[in-house]
Image: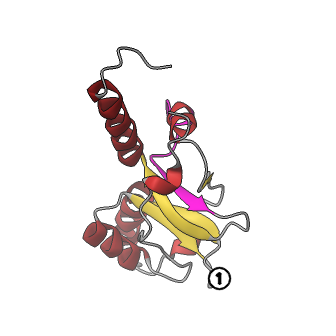
């Protein structure tokens, strides 16, 4: 199971954001994509932040209340982003995301350039597929 890699289950075409986008634009992208959040990237595709539905909702409410729809992604993104590598183990990542960790991880290369994203659902799917395969082969326990 340790050989199940992030690369095999990640979304290679995630929705991304840039710092100059308005909250309304970011929210619209999230709605259309059915993603609950996504990485903020610079012009070289380096991950510099993360935006989620939660931040968008909070800022949209605030902007509506203040009648000021000019908040940008730069002012609401989280800058401390947990990322994973393409060769990281799905099983190790599954253990890491227990509890109140992010639901989405940007997948990056050694230079922090975005390669894709992986979600809790992707991780669950990967483990489920491999467990089913294991049991279909007649094994009764995982080593």
Q: Which residue is mark 1?
A: 44
Q: Can you name the residue that lies furthest to the top here?
A: 140
Would residue 49 be found to the left or right of residue 1 on screen?
right
Helix, strand or loop under label 1: loop
Q: Nearer the viewer, residue 69 or 111?
A: 111
**Percent x, y of residue 95:** 54, 31
Would residue 142 be found to the left or right of residue 82 on screen?
left
User: Residue shown at 26%/72% (left/top)?
Assistant: 32
Q: Can you name the residue that lies furthest to the right here?
A: 111
Q: Nearer the viewer, residue 76 or 48?
A: 48
Q: Which residues are magenta?
A: 96-108
Would residue 121 be found to the left or right of residue 94 on screen?
left
Q: Is residue 4 visible?
A: yes
Would residue 138 be found to the left or right of residue 12 on screen?
left
Q: Nearer the viewer, residue 107 or 104?
A: 107
Q: Does the magenta portion include 18?
A: no
Q: On the image, which quarter does residue 45 sit in? A: bottom right
Mark 1 Cα-neighbour bin, 10 Å: few <14, some 14–19, many ≥20 = few
**Relative height, residue 71 to residue 123 (above, below):** below
**Percent x, y of residue 80:** 66, 55
């Amino acid at each position: 199971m340790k050989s199940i890699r992030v690369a095999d289950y990640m979304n290679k075409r995630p929705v991304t954001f840039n710092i100059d986008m308005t909250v309304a634009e970011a929210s619209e992208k999230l709605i259309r994509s059915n993603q609950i959040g996504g990485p903020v990237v610079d012009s070289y595709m380096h991950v510099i932040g993360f935006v989620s539905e939660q931040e968008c909702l909070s800022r949209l409410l605030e902007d509506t209340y203040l009648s000021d729809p000019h908040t940008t992604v730069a002012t609401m993104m989280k800058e401390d982003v947990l990322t994973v590598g393409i060769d990281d183990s799905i099983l190790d990542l599954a253990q890491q995301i227990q509890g109140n960790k992010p639901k989405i991880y940007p997948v990056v290369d050694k230079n922090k350039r975005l390669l894709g994203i992986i979600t809790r659902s992707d991780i669950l799917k990967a483990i489920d597929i491999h467990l089913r395969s294991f049991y279909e082969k007649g094994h009764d326990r995982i080593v």
